[in-house]
Image (cartoon, rainbow, N blue to C red):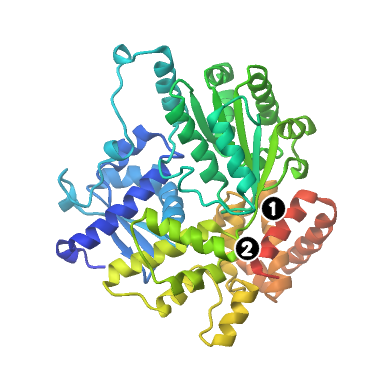
Amino acid sequence: MLIDVVDQYDAEKKALFRGVLERTLLHLAQQQDQKKILSFLCKVGILDLDEHDKVVVFWVPNEFILTQVKKFFAKPLKEAINEVYNPHFSVKFVVYSKFASNNNDLLVDIKKLLNIKEIKKSELKSEKSIIKSELSEFFGILFDPKFTFDTFVVWATNNIAFSAAKAVAAKPGQSYNPLFLYGNVGLGKTHLMQAIGNDIIAKHPDKVVVYLPTSKLIDEIVTAIKANKLTNVLKKFDDVDVLLIDDVQFLADKDKTQEIFHNIFNDFQLHQKQIILSSDRPPKELVHIEPRLKSRFALGLVADIKSPDFETRIAILQSKLMNKWEDLDFNFLEILAKYIKDNVRELEWALNILLSRKAILHKELGQEDVYECLKTLGYTVEHSADATQAAVASNTKWTKNYDLLVDMVAQYYWISVQELKSESRKKEITNARQILMLLAKKYFQRTLERIGDHFGGKWHAAVIYAINNTEKKLKKDQDMAHDYEVFVDRLGK
């Protein structure tokens, strides 16, 4: 991209870049402290969305900010872009001092976007307000306003979960406590949890509501133990009325965290305070988590969310288009719904890609654009009617693209591709690496030498050992076998 042409951007392109940046910042704010985002990203914008090289180019005003943004936000920004725009894009940072002024029309008002206000304790009206402010600063709480019950599409296999979520929001602590939601990746568990939180905040302003991904809960506890401040952290939970913990399966093998969370859970139950949990599997199938925790998870209501049918996938696409004030040919929605069967999140990714193409290319979209979008997401697309129907029927990903599988496994275990290719012997990294080696041999017909080269130049004998060892583990380790089946299912085998 030539930076010299930035001055020639029209209003539509600038609006597109700001829109992507706003969604990125909103997603980022769910995991990061708002004040930190405001400090480092207030003068950072999107300079280009390079569809050819699949790169989002962020500009910063000077070298100092460039250093700080790379240090604190390089990985989080990439993960946010992958979530809200395109799962296969990387990020790049460039210094562009010309846009350092506050009136630059590519900038986003982060204070307004995230509703960040200067709060003085003398101005707060109640003790609850003070508690909310302090907890928000401590945990970095932020609920995404787009996740509501109204924007959640209900279908036959998520209706119980949806109804239970609304009942909990209406009477927190009285209906279905705890509420345990489970289902595969991308089916709306996080949306439903955030909708509960948003609804309680609106209807019960006296309630203190905290949403925590399990990874953040673990980080908070580990940091507190190292700093000898665990008591301080636990006291913070005393002031919480509603606690939402996302992806509790990641508590596996975290013995100390499980023990602490067991105590937090018991205290919430004793005081009839609401707990909502989510996982990729039901409580009884959680492995390497203490039985006493699993039994408590199932004390209230356990509700699953399964994949939507074809008509519902169409409805989901239409709903998301309405929320974006956009429109697409119904035939395009049918094509997307036929190929993308098991992941609602991928349906939104597909829409983001198509709408971005429409905005950047300034033309009406055709079926060719829809097929290119599906290819970008890793789906096999043929243009003959028979071939297309065959692909639709099998819903099979492009299995020859092994790198897509590696990326998916890395994201599933919350590790990086670099860690997979390293010499690390951490259990989750070793398991993921060995599963990938077995899949490479079994489904991609890769030679042992090529598999070894892919994972940092490992010897022929090491690859054989890894594959044989994995096959033995799959017969004994229920958790690992579950994960392996998830990956095989995504391959369409």
Q: Is residue 24 above or below residue 34?
A: below
**Real-space Cα separation, disc 2 to disc 1, in angstroms:** 11 Å
Instruction: Tell how many labels.
Output: 2
Looking at the image, residue 156 sits to the left or right of residue 299; the answer is left
For the residue marked with disc 1, what is the amino acid? Thr
**Which residue matches tag 2?**
455
Look at mark 1 in the image and give the residue it sits on. Answer: 430
Describe the element under mark 1 as helix, strand or loop.
helix
Looking at the image, residue 454 lies above or below residue 120: below
- Indicate which disc, 2 or 1, sits on the residue closer to the N terminus: 1
State the residue at coordinates (33%, 57%). Answer: 325
Q: Position of residue 482 (x, y in %)?
A: 74, 54
Amino acid type indicated by mark 2: Phe
In front of the other: 162 or 484: 162
Location of the C terminus (image quadrant): bottom right
Residue 368 x, y percent position in the rendering: 42, 80
Query: Which of the 4 image quarters holds residue 356?
Result: bottom left
Specify the quadrant of the image occupied by residue 35: top left
Give the position of the N terminus as an image quadrant: bottom left
Mark 1 crowd level (few <14, some 14–19, many ≥20, 10 Å Cα): some
Q: Residue at x 48, y 22 (%)?
A: 207
- Relative to 212, 96 lies left or right: left
State the image coordinates of residue 363 (x, y, percent, origin top left). Answer: 28, 74
Mark 2 crowdedness (10 Å alpha carbons): few <14, some 14-19, many ≥20: many
